[in-house]
Image (spheres, helix red, strand yellow):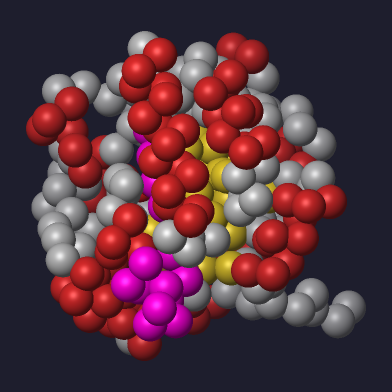
């Protein structure tokens, strides 16, 4: 069988316009990258969650830019169709210039096709975009802000906070970002944001009305000891890892995941 062509941002944007849900899963190494790619997942996120899942830290804060380059290289080597997006880690984008230099490392050495950064860093996003760097925003629960937040809890429950998240989402799109991850916010707020933006939203703990869904690989395989309510162990009902990832992909495409019990 002829391999499917590699996905581009244009394909992902067309999925939003046609109502096709986008599947996304974290990937950190070459073996899993091949399995995830084969399962048909649209986007592989080399997430800085690797600080916890791979490196054993308690948060994403210790992850360095060279860690992200290394894991992006591993993932990029075995992907053929999935679109590869990599996180800019904590304190690697404190200024627009620093962000651009580090994004260049992820793209030139790591093979990333897009970088993701947390928060409403509108000036930085605008600068990256003018340099030809595709950017994904990330709003709601921001794991790199854990020491300010105190816990990994749902964001945007209060009306003022919800309004701020919506305003930030619009500003991020206006600055030129081409995707937006929404983490751990009420499903109704994620629906409003997804309706108001023209770029695709990818939710994690943000309900069924996002344009796509992302999960952390180790959570959906039941490896993480205590997973959040928004995740689901797809290996529990599957005969193999590749079947579990395939079932997740199908559940996202058919809008069967997340169910109400995975949402806020
Ligand atoms: O690092 C990561 O895995 C992420 C997802 C939780 C969206 O950013």
Q: Does 137 lie within the magenta span?
A: yes
Q: Position of residue 154 (x, y in %)?
A: 37, 20
Q: Position of residue 180 (x, y in %)?
A: 50, 49
Residue 245 in view (yes/no): no
Which quadrant is home to the N terminus?
Answer: bottom right
User: On the rendered structure, is 20 left or right of 217?
Assistant: right
Q: Residue at x 69, y 69 (%)?
A: 10
Q: Residue at x 23, y 58 (%)?
A: 89
Q: Position of residue 262 (x, y in %)?
A: 56, 19
Q: Looking at the rendering, which quadrant does residue 103 occupy?
A: bottom left
- In the displayed structure, 253 sits above or below 96; it is above
User: On the rendered structure, is 59 left or right of 249?
Assistant: left
Q: Nearer the viewer, residue 213 or 251?
A: 213
Q: Position of residue 256 (x, y in %)?
A: 75, 28
- In the displayed structure, 40 sits above or below 73; it is above
Q: Nearer the viewer, residue 99 or 75?
A: 99
**What range of the chain is rendered magenta?**
126-140
Q: Nearer the viewer, residue 254 or 222?
A: 254
Q: Residue at x 60, y 45 (%)?
A: 197
User: On the rendered structure, is 84 left or right of 58?
Assistant: right
Residue 2 in view (yes/no): yes
Residue extending farthest to the right is 1
- In the displayed structure, 73 sits above or below 252; it is below
């Amino acid at each position: 069988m002829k391999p499917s062509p590699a996905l581009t941002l244009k394909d992902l944007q067309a999925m939003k316009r046609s109502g096709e849900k986008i599947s996304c899963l974290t990937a950190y190494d070459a073996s899993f990258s091949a399995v995830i790619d084969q399962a048909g997942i649209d986007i592989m996120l080399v997430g800085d969650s690797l600080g916890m899942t791979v490196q054993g830290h308690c948060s994403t804060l210790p992850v360095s830019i060279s860690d992200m380059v290394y894991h992006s290289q591993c993932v990029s080597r075995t992907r053929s169709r999935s679109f590869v997006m990599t996180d800019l880690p904590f304190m690697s984008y404190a200024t627009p210039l620093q962000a651009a230099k580090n994004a260049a490392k992820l793209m030139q050495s790591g093979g990333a096709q897009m970088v993701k950064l947390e928060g409403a860093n509108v000036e930085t996003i605008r600068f990256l975009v003018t340099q030809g760097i595709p950017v994904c925003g990330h709003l709601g629960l921001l794991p790199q802000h854990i020491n300010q937040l105190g816990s990994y809890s749902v964001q945007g429950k209060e009306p003022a906070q919800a309004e701020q998240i919506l305003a930030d989402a619009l500003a991020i799109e206006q600055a030129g970002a081409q995707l937006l991850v929404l983490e751990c916010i009420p499903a109704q707020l994620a629906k409003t944001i997804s309706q108001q933006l023209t770029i695709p939203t990818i939710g994690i703990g943000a309900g069924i009305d996002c344009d796509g869904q992302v999960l952390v690989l180790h959570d959906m395989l039941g490896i993480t000891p205590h997973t959040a309510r928004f995740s689901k162990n797809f290996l529990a009902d599957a005969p193999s890892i590749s079947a579990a990832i395939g079932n997740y992909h199908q559940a996202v495409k058919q809008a069967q995941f997340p169910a109400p019990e995975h949402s806020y």
